[in-house]
Image (cartoon, helix red, strand yellow):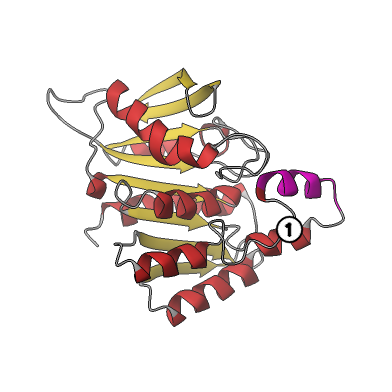
Amino acid sequence: MALFECNIKSDVLELNVAVNVIIPQDVKKGEKLQAVYLLHGYIGNHTDWCRYSSVERYAWEHRFAIIMPGVNNSYYSNTKFGQKYLDYVSIELPEIMSRMFPISEKREDNFVCGLSMGGYGALRVALHNPKRFSKAASLSGAVDIDSIKKLVEDTPRKHFTNATFGEASTKNTENDLLYLIQTHQKNKQELPNIYLACGTEDFLYKDNLAFKKELDHLKVPYTYEESKGDHNWAFWDEYLQKVLYWLEKKV
């Protein structure tokens, strides 16, 4: 495998940004690779997956291009006061990557996965551009933004979440994953295949169970796994391996 440390210009963000890319170095002439956009969590950046997991070693078993962008603490959203990170990750970045690397542009060949903030981001990105992404995996995902806002109410993070989402509730807005799913259902838009995993000791475990229950209510198919584990890299490293195999399945 080859690791590229890229610095690119984003017109959407009006910023120079960093992206790490893992890719097989024996790509055949004319071959187009499936792509996994691997998203970091809060406080993280584009180096996290390479630093704290064995993603490069796991990639040996798969012929994926693995793309790891950095988005600061934006929740992969078009922020209330700031840059449009959702448009960057879901639309602009895939277009740039497919021009730079031998990556397929077909929907069935493009996937997104993330942890914590990036778990929310993976679902948000796929629902924002369902014509590009066919599968989305959330590990310990922050799937309920209103719950996150309550959690940080008396902390300095409150100012950051308000800058991202505003002070009002996100329910029934474009930052509400369930609202987006319902909107797509009404419009008969094909939804991405969804994978959810969370540790039973994770502080986001109850939010994930509640989200899973709502998916059942909406009759949205998904894959769900849980096991003993906390909100940490031991859990995410283990479940990244499961996700990569899930992505290869024809589901």
Residue behind mark 1: 149
x then y, percent, for residue 111: 35, 47
Q: Is residue 1 visible?
A: no
240 lies left or right of 210: left
| Image coords of residue 210 (percent x, y) | 58, 75
Quarter of the picture containing the N terminus is top left
Q: Which residue in the rendered view is the most extreme toward the bottom?
A: 217
Q: Closer to the camera, 56 or 65? A: 65
Would you place residue 81 above or below residue 186 in this image? above
Residue 159 is inside the magenta segment: yes
Q: Nearer the viewer, residue 224 or 87?
A: 87
Residue 84, percent from left and from top = 55, 37
Horizontal placement of 152 versus 179: left or right?
A: right
Q: Position of residue 11 (x, y in %)?
A: 47, 23
What's the amino acid at mark 1? Lys
Instruction: Give the structural element (helix, strand or loop) at label 1.
Output: helix
- Identify whether 122 is placed above or below 183: above
Q: In percent of the image, x 41 and y 23: which residue is there?
A: 3
Q: Is residue 150 magenta?
A: no
Q: Where is 95 relative to 182, above or below?
A: above
Q: Give the residue drawn at x 46%, y 68%.
A: 225
Q: Is residue 79 above or below residue 56?
A: below
How would you classify the magenta stretch by its main secondary structure? helix
Farthest residue in the right direction?
A: 154
Q: Residue 70 is drawn in which quadrant?
A: top right
For the C terminus, the quadrant is: bottom left
Which stretch did the figure color magenta? 155-164
Specify whether residue 133 is in view: yes
